[in-house]
Image (spheres, helix red, strand yellow):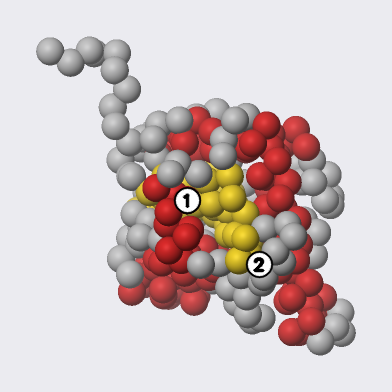
Amino acid sequence: MPDRNETPPPRYRRVMLKISGEALMGDQGYGLHPPTVERIAGQVQAVRARGVELCMVIGGGNIFRGLQGSAQGMERTTADYMGMLATVMNALAMQAALEALGVFTRVISAIPMDQICEPYIRRRAVRHLEKGRVCIFAAGTGNPYFTTDTAATLRASEMACEAIFKGTKVDGVYDSDPAKNPDAKRFETVSYDEVLRRHLKVMDASAIALARDNDMPIIVFSLNDPGGFAGVLDGQGPHTTVR
């Protein structure tokens, strides 16, 4: 007879966690806030301890955002490459926080930089996951004009992830900005096509289309909720599922 206190198995065997660079800066206006990085690493550790194979993609907006650089007169390709390098810095910070908690981690970059991280080789990355290591995919897709949302969806598809979890500052997808409209309604579920049609700010259109084409659910939740990543993985706490 099973133990009633036994933790049920997780709903997903392998997932992608996508977080923005801004999530790492806490209440600061720029850069990395070490206690915030450590808190998110603790959430990742809790999920990994459940036996879930885990990929991550972290944006670079807390250090440099290519679109903003382009808007200020910088050539777009150069600005995007600078943004990709910012994601590598964030990935290394998260790796350090995870390994301080005893979680084996590999940073895998789409732009080769052998002294500090591994180049992206799909079969090698899959093997890392099978061995229980967290894989943090950095430098986007390695190409300008593509966001880290698209990179996360692409890597999730290549790694055969079963879902993408997008950690944000809000607890799901709303029909309008909840910071500006107190009557905004949160969706429990929403379709890919409705996200595109209504221009709901989940991920960019390329990422949503790629997720739709590969039947990849996207679960949007708040990194600040008490249950955090592990709770949402079990279907608890407020969140929105795009499917």
Can you identify the residue that label 1 sits on?
128
* Residue at the spot 73% in from the left edge and 57% down from the top edge: 116
Q: Quadrant of residue 7?
A: top left
* Residue at the spot 63% in from the left edge and 80% down from the top edge: 143
Q: Is residue 214 above or below residue 10?
A: below
Say which of 118 and 196 sits in front: 118
Secondary element type, mark 2: loop
Residue 172 place in picture, x, y as percent: 49, 49
| Direction from residue 44 to residue 138 in the image, left or right | right
| Direction from residue 10 to residue 118 in the image, left or right | right
* Residue at the spot 52% in from the left edge and 63% down from the top edge: 152
Q: Is residue 123 above or below residue 111?
A: above
Dot 2: few (<14), some (14–19), or many (≥20) neighbours within 10 Å? Answer: many
| Direction from residue 227 to residue 50 in the image, left or right | left
Residue 95 place in picture, x, y as percent: 66, 44
Quadrant where the C terminus is found in the figure: bottom left
Q: Is residue 237 above or below residue 110?
A: above
Q: What's the residue type where badge 1 is placed? A: His
Can you identify the residue that label 2 sits on?
139
Say which of 212 and 181 sits in front: 212
Q: Quadrant of residue 103?
A: top right
- What separation in Å lies between label 2 and label 1 (alpha carbons)? 18 Å
Say which of 178 and 17 sits in front: 17
Residue extending furthest right? 73
Residue 28 place in picture, x, y as percent: 83, 44
Residue 150 place in picture, x, y as percent: 53, 70
Question: In the rendered image, is residue 189 in sight?
Answer: yes
Secondary element type, mark 1: helix
Q: What's the residue type where badge 2 is placed? A: Ala
Q: Nearer the viewer, mark 2 or mark 1?
A: 1
* Residue at the spot 43% in from the left edge and 63% down from the top edge: 123
Q: Quadrant of residue 2?
A: top left
